[in-house]
Amino acid sequence: MASELSVMFRRRRTWAMLAALAAIPVLIAVAVRVTGAGQSGHGPAFLDRITQNGLFVVLTALVLCTPLFLPLTVGVVAGDTVAGEAGLGTLRYLLVAPAGRARLLLVKYVGAAVFCLAATASVLLAGTVAGLALFPAGPVPLLSGELVDGWTAEGRILLVGAYVCVSLLGLAAVGLFISTLTDVPVGAMAATIALAIAAQLLDALPQLDWLHPWLFSHWWLGFADLLRQPVEWTSFGNNAALQLGYVLVFGALAYGRFATKDVLS
Amino acid sequence: MSGPPQGSGPDGGAAVIETRGLTKRFGRQTAVDGLDLSVPAGAVFGFLGPNGSGKTTTIRMLLGLANATSGTASVLGQDMPGRLDAVLPRVGALVEGPAFYPFLSGTANLRRLDAADPHSPRATRRQRVADALERVGLQHAGSKKVKAYSLGMKQRLGLANALLRPRELLVLDEPTNGLDPQGTREVRNLVRSLAAGGATVFVSSHLLAEVEQICTHAAVMRTGRLVAQGTLAGLRAAGQPLVVVRTPDAGAARRVLDSLGLVPGPPTHGADMADGATVTAKLPAAARDGAPRPEAIVAALVADGVRVRGFSMESGSLEDRFVELTGEGFDVAR
């Protein structure tokens, strides 16, 4: 496990993706600072509140990153898990070590989950620093109207971060499964990312509303409920249950596929 | 098939690798067809065959990377792939060329692969990696990233990976691929020293010369089938001995040889026509026991007025035997 993480974090690609994610809140903060207050009601959610309180940089960045940039990076890492090793040829050496197929798969999934956490954390951290550096801090108005102090607000933001991170776990499991189907890592990455986008498109079609609660992306932007007083936990619970379901189903599929697969790469 | 009896090596020791009817099909194509392989303990076993004859597929099945379509395999006396977790830590392997993470150093790559086995002792890892690197002559390149390695260096690193722990069996697939003559010699010495240390070494190769110098036993594959297996001496003896006659009377010599039950080939003329031609004749396998002795052949030739200027018996080289078994030429099998 330690070796898996060290391989992941010794890759320049991992750091490039984390840096790109961190750049997004910084970019938002600088843009808003330079052009002055955004017009109320335009642009992504929370954008117009940034000038009042720096912590809204984080929330704006998460709204922007959740549908596209975070799934993109998670798709790259999750799609690479098994197919990447197969592509390098190291998969056969790991298996004759012997690493054990179930153990290898588990370690690979935990590695991808750690990346989900690191990716969310990097948006959170960069957003908080950029927001507090360029804009006033102080009491934050919640969506339900109450004002809370900065520390409580930061706590809520961490909750939102946890929500986003959990949201990505289902996608990571889907990516792991796709990764066991091929020896071409780029194919697995592209397929995972395409699925993330397709799920959101399907979620936008009202004709398919019976399907919506089953899409792994359905609750992705539901974190606003965590910004009410008292905290509304329903969407967090629904999201976590759905993601857990995806992890179990696609984890089982990935194991079913990988346990008996001929490794010919 | 000239293989040793099933279940035991020629010395009576248990077979280290034993397969029965091992078969692998990919779709409609049969890559390995009913393989009965038996590798005795302590042997340096050459696994020969042209490219595409099923050697690597066999190795993948022996190591549990691929599932056999039918048949069974046992390695170190235990069923594969059923007892994979118990068997593989005792086996060092180089499969179809080395493969590493290009963005990690040689040392980091070996540590990663060593850590992949949950039972490999962590405390001695650093030392074992350093020793393995030294054994293959990479001690000064360990900190370099693998993407800066030449093919030969990667091959050496692959061998180092197989030597991270004391192994009872080494499975080396084309170990000298990409190595210069110096490196090839070093690999030969390495294999000899491993065998001297009591390990069984299973070396696959499409180059006969490489195997001939180090192996005690060999098996030959052709289009997925095993066509010969046994000790090197046994394989050599199974080849057809040749009778070589140098004479100006080529036509008469061929008639005499033919009448003795030999199979003469067309005469070949040397640079100097006055010196006559060389006639070679094969001793057919069927007639081997009742074949005339060399002195009888010479006497028959002389009695018929053939002016014999040179005569020799040559036991077929292993190369002739190899070509005989696998077919000549550049066509990759299938």
Image: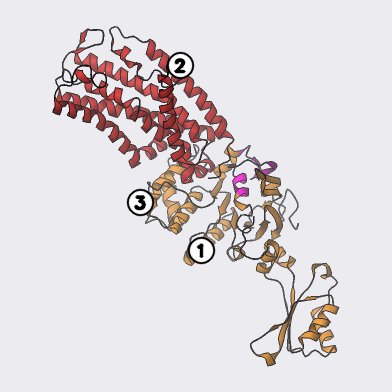
Q: Amino acid at mark 1?
A: Thr
Q: Which residue is mark 1?
A: B184
Q: Which residues are magenta?
A: B57-83
Q: Amino acid at mark 3?
A: Ser
* On screen, residue B4 above or below B288: above
Cα gap from disc 2 to disc 3, whole angstroms: 59 Å
Q: Position of residue A119 (x, y in %)?
A: 33, 29
Q: Position of residue B242 (x, y in %)?
A: 74, 75
* On screen, residue B45 above or below B274: above
Q: Position of residue A30 (x, y in %)?
A: 18, 29
Q: Nearer the viewer, mark 2 or mark 3?
A: 2
Badge 2 marks a residue whose secondary structure is helix
Which of the labelled discs sits on residue A207, or is there none? 2
Q: Residue at x 65, y 90 (%)?
A: B272
Q: Amino acid at mark 2?
A: Gln
Q: Residue at x 24, y 22 (%)?
A: A43
